[in-house]
Image (tube, helix red, strand yellow):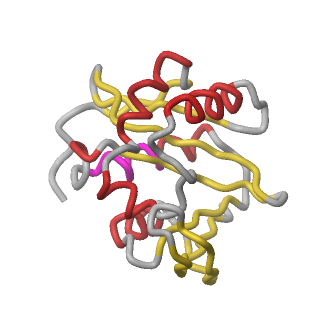
Amino acid sequence: MEDIKHEIKLRPTVVADLEILFQFQLDPEANHLAAFTSKDSTNKEAYLAKYTKLLNDTTVNNQTIMAGTVIAGSIAKFIMEGDAEITYWIDKNFWGQGVATTALKEFLKIETARPIFGRVAFDNSGSQKVLEKCGFVKIGTDTGFANARQTEIEEFIYRLDA
């Protein structure tokens, strides 16, 4: 891992961020690694509608990851089946620089829901390392249909209690 070249900060996501965040998730390699994506990641109208609605959902904590003055990604807590879950997406240009780990550590200071869970595709070792560096423990596996791969795959389930 390279040293972080920029100061990493979080700020609440605003509607104006969504255009840039939409572009990040169009990357084929990033989409493949994320695996569990929307049915059509190229549908900008659907993306903007979904995430604009989520910005107004008080159960969701949406933060934009800033690397200096540049948007480097997003991170959020949401509720799924009664459990707090974490999700993040980093612009491919910032991979391997410690941005996701730093952002998650900062996020966990402001998001106090515990336990909090993280799910990651079985072959997304980068994201697995991020969760582990932040204290998440692998507690199990599940299978589900991965839209980005058009097949059912295994995902690892991680949990953070403290």
Q: Is residue 128 above or below residue 113?
A: below
Classify residue 108 as left or right of residue 85.
Answer: left
Does residue 145 appear to the left or right of 18 in the view shown?
Answer: right
- Tell me the quarter of the picture where residue 139 sits: bottom right
Q: Position of residue 161 (x, y in %)?
A: 68, 65
Asked if residue 66 lies in the magenta stretch, the reply is: no
Residue closest to the far right: 82
Which residue does the image show at 52% across and 75% down from the upper left?
A: 151
Residue that appears at 78% across and 38% down: 59
Counting labels gives 0
Left or right side of 58 for 118: left
Q: Nearer the viewer, residue 131 or 72?
A: 72
Residue most extreme to the top: 16
Tell me where residue 47 appears, x and y as whole percent.
Answer: 56, 35
The C terminus: image quadrant: bottom right
At 28% from the left and 31% from the top, the residue drawn is 7
Residues rendered magenta in the picture: 98-104
Q: Front-most of 97 and 24?
A: 24
Q: Which of the 4 image quarters holds residue 23?
A: top left
Please say if 114 is above or below 26: below
Direction from residue 73 to residue 57 in the image, left or right: right
Q: Main secondary structure of the magenta part?
A: helix
User: Considering the image in quadrants, where does the N terminus appear?
Assistant: bottom left
Q: Nearer the viewer, residue 152 or 90?
A: 152
Residue 102 lies in the magenta-colored region: yes
Q: Where is residue 60? Give x, y as percent.
A: 71, 38
Residue at figure coordinates x 51%, y 42% from the top left = 75
Residue 8 pos. (x, y %): 34, 34
Tell me the quarter of the picture where residue 156 sits: bottom right
